[in-house]
Image (cartoon, rainbow, N blue to C red):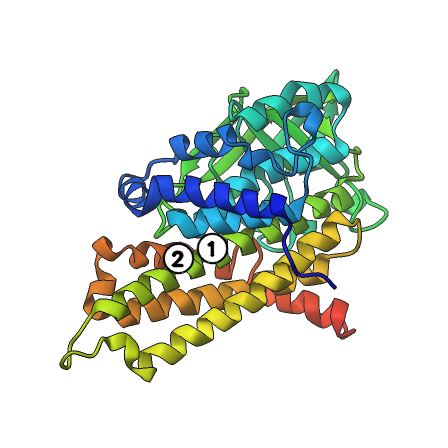
Amino acid sequence: MDFSLSNEHAMLVETARKVGEKFGLDYWREHDEKKLFAEEFWQAVCDSGLGAVALPEEYGGSGLGMLEMALVIENLAAGGGGATLGQLFMNNPIFGGIPLVKFGTARQKDEMLRPLVEGRMRFAMALTEPDVGSNTLALKTFARRVDGGWRINGSKIWITCMPQAHKVLVVARTTRMEDAPRRTHGFTMFLIDTDREGLTHSAIDKVGTNTNPSSNVYFDDVFARDDEVVGTVDGGWSELLEVLNTERIVTTAGMVGAGKLALRLGVDYAKTRKVFGSTPIGAYQGLQFPMAEAHAELECARLMNLKAAWLHDQDMAYGSEANTAKFLSVRAATQAIERAMQTMGGMGFSKDMHVERLWRDARLFQFAPVSEEMVLNFIAVHDLGLPRGY
């Protein structure tokens, strides 16, 4: 096994580091306070080519893979953005790029991939429903056949960056559950305009990730053309899983970057803060050991995530690794942020020190985009062979 990074990887990491640090902590604090989408940041990511590292060269991408995307997100997040960086990549190269590249028609690719690469078109995905939560197989949003296309009715919740998106990937049933020959039959993905008649959304007031708004989304007889189906009518379940497993990888990369950023802030503070005489508080093992432990756990999560990304790029099964990495990274990053805040004492509660934003943002990822409990269910059933209980 070879754990070394290539020269190309080193260049990507350095570029991501520079872009992340160019915007920095104050940019993200201001945008968090004002609940502003980081439009200038995302455009800079696209202009530098970082947003399209895993998209095809023929559409302006770099033609690389999920491994490179994970490295990019890690370093952008560590530059100041924290965990919300993963969501920006989740929405665009994942929710937009993956379905189009793997399942889209030639016309769909021609119409949307280059604008995605250039930052002119942004995406969202409407999957989660109010009464369904993690039980995606039970979703109720239904698309019925009509002349020339489909009419979609239903509602979704916790949809990220809906106001900023030009296109939304809608997951709906096209065969009702009671008529399906099996539970996974009858799912279809549609990629439609967000300003379509009958499609409305309302903001959810929340505690963190304020730069990426969350919305309730409503579909009232929304029309989708036949040529807006992405993938296979009624056969979209396995295609959706391809999207969701890559979502785990970008989430983990954002968490690793957030943890590294928190540790850097905590260490910098501990090196200079003196309370009892001339010795910096960073010399005290009571502060050293928790941060060292968080660092060790972050490195383990990072390696598992890079393994998952590498397996994906080799067209090998990677679901267990992606889920395990997500589980580990959230715990490690949360501990790193908590310990950085504790190291700063009362100042850690101040917005001036930035870790309180990282703290608020990171909490989301204990239950999104997949909860810790569902990850453990997956590991228990798929890796340990225990009986399914849900």
Q: CA distance from mark 1 to mark 2?
A: 6 Å
Residue 53 x %, y %: 61, 37
Are dots 1 and 2 in contact, CB under 8 Å? yes
- Residue 306 lies left or right of residue 85; in this view the side is right
Q: Secondary structure at mark 2?
A: helix
| Along the viewing direction, whichever of 163 and 263 lies nearer the viewer | 263
Name which residue lies at 54% across and 24% down: 118
- Residue 389 lies left or right of residue 69; in this view the side is right
Residue 97 x %, y %: 64, 34
Residue 85 x %, y %: 47, 46
| Residue denoted by label 1 | 257
| Residue denoted by label 2 | 261
* Circle 1: residue type: Gly
Name which residue lies at 48% across and 34% down: 45
In the rendered view, would you say 339 is above or below 63? below
* Farthest-out residue, top: 148
* Farthest-out residue, right: 181
Name which residue lies at 40% across and 48% down: 79
Which quarter of the image is occupied by the N terminus? bottom right
Indicate the quadrant where residue 382 lies. Answer: bottom right
Residue 242 x %, y %: 72, 46
Q: Which mark is residue 265?
A: none
Residue 185 seen in this snapshot: yes
* Circle 2: residue type: Leu
| Along the viewing direction, whichever of 103 and 234 lies nearer the viewer | 103
- Residue 272 lies left or right of residue 197; in this view the side is left
Indicate the quadrant where residue 12 lies. Answer: top right
For label 2, count other residues whose C-alpha is less than 10 Å away and answer few (under 14), some (14-19) or many (20+).
Answer: many
| Along the viewing direction, whichever of 273 and 27 lies nearer the viewer | 273
Which quarter of the image is occupied by the C terminus? bottom right
Q: Secondary structure at mark 1?
A: helix
